[in-house]
Amino acid sequence: MSSLFEQAIINALNSVNPQKVLEDKVANAIIRAGFDLVSFNKTVGLNGEIGEIDMETSNAIIEVGKSDSSSTNLYAGKSSA
């Protein structure tokens, strides 16, 4: 894996939080697909008071979520940049 966020992604994989592990798997899939990851677990607002962006490419912001039914939901929207 060659990414500016390599250590953060490895930390997510080793997390006890299943949401973070899922974010790691999605980030790895994005990198393997050849997309450039521009941010990973980026906080928004002062000390993250607004929230967090799970990951971002030059063309999309990606939020990863797991519903109660154990299915994976990916929410992606085009970046305004």
Image: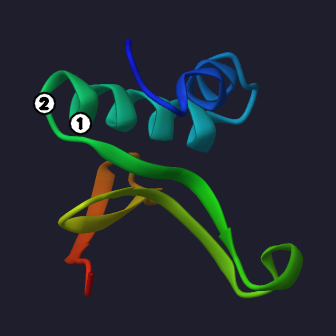
Look at label 1 and name its amino acid. Ile
The x and y percentages for residue 65 are 44, 58
Residue depicted at 64% across the width and 22% down the height: 7
Q: Does residue 63 appear in the picture of this structure?
A: yes
Residue depicted at 11% across the width and 29% down the height: 33
Q: Which mark, by number, is residue 30?
A: 1
The x and y percentages for residue 74 are 28, 59
Circle 2: element type: loop
Residue depicted at 72% across the width and 25% down the height: 15
- Residue sitting nearer the eye, 67 or 18: 18
Q: Can you name the residue that lies furthest to the left here?
A: 33
Estimate how packed mark 1 is, as few (under 14), some (14 to 19) or many (20 or more) residues with alpha carbons within 10 Å: some
Estimate how packed mark 2 is, as few (under 14), some (14 to 19) or many (20 or more) residues with alpha carbons within 10 Å: few
Is 34 displayed left or right of 57 in the figure?
Answer: left
Q: Quadrant of residue 12?
A: top right
Q: Does residue 79 lie above or below 68 as drawn?
A: below
Q: Quadrant of residue 76?
A: bottom left
- Residue sitting nearer the eye, 8 or 20: 8
Q: Please name which of the two marks, 1 or 2, marks the residue nearer to the observer.
A: 2
Q: Does residue 52 lie above or below 70 as drawn?
A: below
Quarter occupied by the C terminus: bottom left
What is the distance, in whole Å, between disc 1 and disc 2 at their CAs?
7 Å
Q: Which mark, by number, is residue 34?
A: 2
Look at label 2 and name its amino acid. Gly
The x and y percentages for residue 45 are 74, 85
